[in-house]
Image (tube, rainbow, N blue to C red):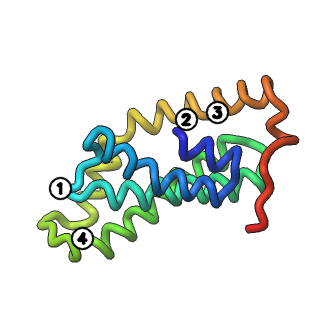
Amino acid sequence: YPTYFAGFVLGPTYGFAVGLLTPLISHLVTGMPAMQPPVLPYMAIEMAAYGLVIGFVSRKINNIFIPLLTAMVVGRIIMLAALYLLIPFFKLPVPPLVYFKTGLVTSIPGIVIQLILVPTFIAILKRRTSLNERRFTESD
């Protein structure tokens, strides 16, 4: 969730950075996501895409659902591309599409929760602050 909020509130650059760093920090603190099998690099790429995309799209569309759904879809597509590029490097015996489908199926509960909680918290944040006027602008 921090990635979506960073992208939405701070913009695409910070959203990208938070998305890239969050899995690494989580790994250092908790040991998850795992390095073997290499979940961490794929998750970092996917989450960086989430923050970048929601940051860009939310600047153009004043509706949290469209940027959120767009970020979710684009992030998954980028993760699939990363799987095709990096699985041979890691020499995993699992085909990229199988790895992707397994991750997608296991993430469905999280996707549903995100579709409920992220818009709810953004709406609360907008009501309680002057978020629309205070959103940081970036030159990118």
Query: Is 53 or 19 nearer to us in this picture?
Result: 19
Point out which mark residue 115 bears.
2
Residue contact at pointers 1 and 3, CB within 8 angstroms:
no
The mark lying in front, picked from 2 and 4, is 4
The alpha-carbon separation of the residues under discs 2 and 1 comes to 29 Å
> Closer to the N terminus: mark 2 or mark 1?
1
The vertical placement of 24 against 117, above or below, is below
Quarter of the image for the C terminus: give it.
Answer: bottom right
> Closer to the N terminus: mark 1 or mark 4?
1
Q: Residues within 10 Å of mark 2 (few under 14, many from 20)?
A: some
Residue, x 64% and y 27% (percent of image)?
120
Q: Position of residue 21 (x, y in %)?
A: 46, 53
Residue contact at pointers 3 and 2, CB within 8 angstroms:
yes
Is 13 situated left or right of 31 in this image? right
The amino acid type, in three-letter code, at marker 2 is Leu
Name the element at disc 1. Answer: loop
